[in-house]
Amino acid sequence: MSIKGLAIFQVLRGTMSMLGERQKVLARNIANANTPGFVAKDIDSKSFGRALSGAIQKNGASSGHVSLKVSDPAHIHRSNGSSSTGVSGNFKIITRPDSETTLNGNSVVLEEQVMHVAETRMRYEAAAGLYEKSMGLLRLAISRPGR
């Protein structure tokens, strides 16, 4: 089994992939902050988490394989048609209006979107840090004693 096949790395790569897609959705929200009738969107991270947990339980942690299925035609599809993460990269985008809606129907509040971007960045950095630390532990485990 390759290192990429270990469940911890697949979960972390899947999480980072979802957070990267969330940053794109949030950037689109910010770009459309003045578009009349635009409603803020977000990635449905709860359904992603449930699907990821279900995939892990279904496949078992020892199999090292985590995959998700498209359950909604509105899911985002990767352009290359496949995923190296083990998680298929299909994330459900939901409408999530911010706390206010302007008279022209726009529901994007820039301050809230910037907070979401900062939160997503922190979560991504934490997952990337865990990935790096896990790789370091594996390198330590396979290195020769006395080095």
Image (spheres, helix red, strand yellow):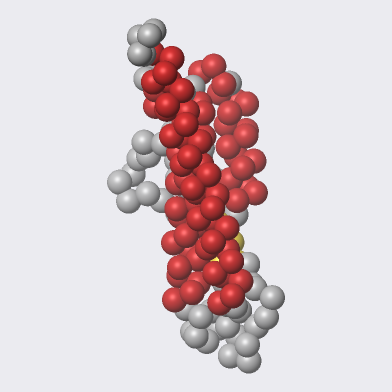
Q: Residue furthest top?
A: 145
Residue 83 percent across, percent down from the top left: 37, 39
Image height of 120 relative to 35, above or below = above
Quadrant for the C terminus, please: top left
Q: Residue furthest bottom?
A: 103
Image height of 17 relative to 119, above or below = above
Asked whether the viewer can see residue 39, the reply is no
Q: Nearer the viewer, residue 79 or 1?
A: 1
Indicate the quadrant where residue 58 lies.
top right
Q: Is residue 119 left or right of residue 18?
A: right
Residue displayed at 47% across by 31% down: 133
Q: Nearer the viewer, residue 66 or 31?
A: 31
Q: Is residue 17 left or right of residue 37?
A: left
Residue 140 percent across, percent down from the top left: 42, 18
Q: How many marks are shown on the rendered structure?
A: 0
Residue 68 percent across, percent down from the top left: 51, 37
Q: Nearer the viewer, residue 44 or 99?
A: 99
Residue displayed at 55% across by 49% down: 123
Asked whether the viewer can see residue 112, the reply is yes
Q: Residue furthest right?
A: 99
Q: Is residue 122 left or right of residue 142?
A: right
Image height of 91 relative to 42, above or below = above
Residue displayed at 65% across by 73% down: 98
Quadrant for the N terminus, please: top left
Residue 112 percent across, percent down from the top left: 61, 71
